[in-house]
Image (cartoon, rainbow, N blue to C red):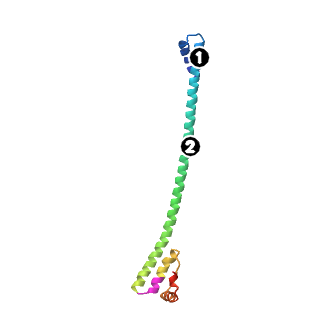
């Protein structure tokens, strides 16, 4: 490409500068310099585009990896949540049914025991198992600490 533009530059230079050989030399030199700059600029743009493309591909790969990791994390989280809440739900259903039955039968001890099942399942502290234990703690002033 540089040689072809140099030939045209020599013809144009000789036409513009009617001094034999000098006009052609200057025209060829100018055409060669312009073409060289154009080619160099074009090559730099191609290189930059290639680097940008490679960077885009890297970012896409990272996004795909992050998306896959997020899917795996979500699946694992849903698994744990489903199992944990299923266990909690079973415990709550059993305890609430027991509390309802205890209320119908006026059985405070059974009500406390069923309420304590929920407290234990949620990691809380159980302080009384029966009404008598509560009354003893009340009489001894222990209840104020809770």
Labels 1 and 2 touching (C-beta < 8 A): no
Residue 29 position (above or below residue 101):
above
State the mark number for residue 141.
none
Residue 135 position (above or below residue 30):
below
Q: Which residue appears at 48% of the width and 87% of the height? A: 131
Residue 1 appears anywhere in the view: no
The nearer-to-camera label among 1 and 2 is: 1
Q: Disc 1 marks which residue?
A: 26
- In the picture, the quarter occupied by the N terminus is top right
Residue sitting at the far left: 104
Category of crowding for the residue at label 2, using alpha-carbon neighbours closer than 10 angstroms: few (below 14), some (14–19), many (at least 20): few
For the image, the number of numbered tags is 2
Dot 2 falls on a residue whose secondary structure is helix
Q: Which range of residues does the magenta coloring cover?
A: 106-112
Q: Nearer the viewer, residue 46 or 137?
A: 137
Across and down, in percent, residue 138 comes to 49, 87
Q: Quadrant of residue 55?
A: top right
Across and down, in percent, residue 122 comes to 51, 74
Task: Choose the circle earlier in sequence order: 1 or 2.
Answer: 1
Across and down, in percent, residue 68 comes to 53, 54
Residue 80 position (above or below residue 133):
above
């Amino acid at each position: 490409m540089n040689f072809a533009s140099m030939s045209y530059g020599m013809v144009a230079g000789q036409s513009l500068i009617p001094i034999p050989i000098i006009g052609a030399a200057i025209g060829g030199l100018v055409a060669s310099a312009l073409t060289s700059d154009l080619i160099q600029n074009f090559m730099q743009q191609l290189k930059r585009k290639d680097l940008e493309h490679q960077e885009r591909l890297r970012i896409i790969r990272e996004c795909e990896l992050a998306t896959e990791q997020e899917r795996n994390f979500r699946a694992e989280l849903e698994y744990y949540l489903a199992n944990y809440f299923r266990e909690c739900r079973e415990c709550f259903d059993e305890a609430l049914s027991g509390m309802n039955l205890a209320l119908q039968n006026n059985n405070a001890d059974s009500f406390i025991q069923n309420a304590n099942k929920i407290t234990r399942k949620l990691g809380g502290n159980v302080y009384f198992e029966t009404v008598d234990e509560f009354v003893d703690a009340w009489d001894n002033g222990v209840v104020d600490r809770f």
